[in-house]
């Protein structure tokens, strides 16, 4: 079979590999789609992940079709469409340093248990949407860390795939009003299509002032000076220092900030200045429980989630797909 592998710093190749064999407790999955993540660019740049430095299989956002089911595996049949938990693989994280990658023609799931390693999805959902399950689990974990309550008002910074997924998840959790902030008009238009109640172009508008117009003015708190928007949740999916600066200056008493973005440089925080706000700051990494929690919402709202996909690239052009990943949400279609 074919698989995409890091071959050295800055280089990848489609290589021939042995097709994995399924034992009685295993499931062989024919890959049908796999998303490209920004972390894939990092793996390529550094030349792979130990212990497979220089030979790291890529692809950790997989969706596929069951090709073989071991005799001791329950709850699956050949032809089922499935999404895989790449973190649960017994031979390492799929596509992130493990022995297998989702940008392959086949992946074998050892000791497969439905609900732990993989889960079925309806066959009418396009595979490129099913492949969003993993990044949308990341977005949902960021939302969960913010502890949204019905009726809350929220703002998401960054209208990339994670930010858009967070906006959808917030609405599904009953948040009353969700604003998305970005500087790219096309991304803001997409945010409205996935269900955001309003958008702000931060290159053209004062974010705090506009949030106050949209969410109202927060009650004055002890030691809190000036007008603050009544925004309950701030979610950072952008990773720019100015986002943190904006939130710290705007946050009302008792607001929550969830940071799911990767900040590549240190951000200075004056804790003395925000002490009286009692702002809750949480970090969100990966998806400890969300990998299949997100699936029912993805299935029920797949047309909204489909808006997140910017490009579907055939497997024959996978090298081009890897170069496009920073421009949007690229999914590789695998025949």
Image (cartoon, rainbow, N blue to C red):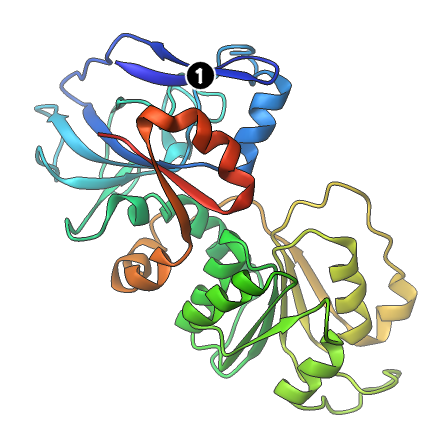
- Check the image and report above or below for 114 versus 217: above
- Residue 285 placement: quadrant: top right
- Left or right of 133: which side holds 127? left
Q: Residue 273 placed where, x, y %?
A: 90, 69
Q: Residue 229 placed where, x, y %?
A: 71, 83
The residue positioned 72% from the left and 72% from the top of the image is 204
- Left or right of 30: which side holds 46? right
- Check the image and report above or below for 327 versus 102: below
- Check the image and report above or below for 175 versus 3: below
Image quarter where the C terminus lies is top left
Image quarter where the N terminus lies is top left
The total number of labels drawn is 1
Residues 89 and 211: in front is: 211
The residue positioned 19% from the left and 24% from the top of the image is 28
- Left or right of 79: which side holds 193? right
- Check the image and report above or below for 297 versus 320: below
User: Badge 1: how crowded within 10 Å, few (<14), some, or many (20+)?
Assistant: many
Q: Which residue is mark 1?
A: 5
Q: Residue 145 placed where, x, y %?
A: 56, 59
The residue positioned 59% from the left and 16% from the top of the image is 47
Secondary structure category for the residue under label 1 = strand
- Residue 63 placement: quadrant: top left
Does residue 316 appear in the picture of this structure?
A: yes
Does residue 252 appear in the picture of this structure?
A: no
Q: Residue 85 placed where, x, y %?
A: 35, 37
């Amino acid at each position: 079979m074919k698989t995409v592998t890091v071959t050295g710093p800055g280089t990848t190749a489609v290589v021939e590999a042995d097709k994995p064999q399924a034992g009685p407790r295993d499931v062989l999955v024919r890959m049908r789609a796999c998303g490209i993540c920004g972390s894939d660019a990092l793996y390529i740049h550094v030349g792979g992940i130990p212990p497979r430095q220089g030979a790291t299989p890529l692809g950790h956002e997989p969706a596929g079709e069951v090709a073989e089911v071991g005799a001791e595996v329950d709850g699956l049949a050949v032809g089922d469409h499935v999404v895989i938990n790449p973190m649960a693989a017994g031979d390492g994280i799929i596509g992130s340093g493990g022995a297998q990658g989702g940008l392959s023609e086949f992946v074998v799931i050892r000791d497969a248990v439905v609900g732990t390693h993989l889960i079925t999805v309806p066959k009418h959902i396009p595979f490129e949407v099913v492949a969003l399950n993993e990044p949308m689990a990341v977005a949902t974990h960021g939302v969960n860390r913010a502890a949204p309550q019905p009726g809350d008002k929220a703002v998401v910074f960054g209208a990339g795939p994670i930010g858009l997924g967070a906006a959808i998840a917030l609405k599904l959790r009953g948040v009353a009003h969700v604003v998305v902030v970005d500087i790219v008009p096309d991304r803001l238009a997409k945010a409205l299509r996935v269900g955001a109640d309003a958008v702000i172009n931060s290159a053209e508008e004062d974010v705090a002032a506009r949030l106050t117009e949209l969410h109202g003015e927060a009650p004055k708190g002890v030691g809190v000076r000036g007008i603050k928007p009544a925004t309950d949740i701030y979610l950072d999916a952008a990773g720019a220092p100015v986002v943190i600066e904006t939130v710290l200056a705007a946050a009302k008493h008792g607001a929550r900030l969830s940071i799911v973005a990767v900040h590549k440089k240190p951000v200075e925080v004056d804790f003395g200045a925000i002490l009286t706000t009692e702002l809750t700051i949480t970090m969100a990494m990966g998806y400890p429980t969300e990998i299949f929690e997100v699936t029912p919402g993805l299935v029920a709202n797949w047309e909204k989630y489909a808006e997140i996909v910017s490009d579907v690239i055939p497997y024959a052009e996978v090298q081009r797909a890897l170069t496009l990943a920073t421009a949007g949400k690229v999914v590789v279609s695998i025949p």
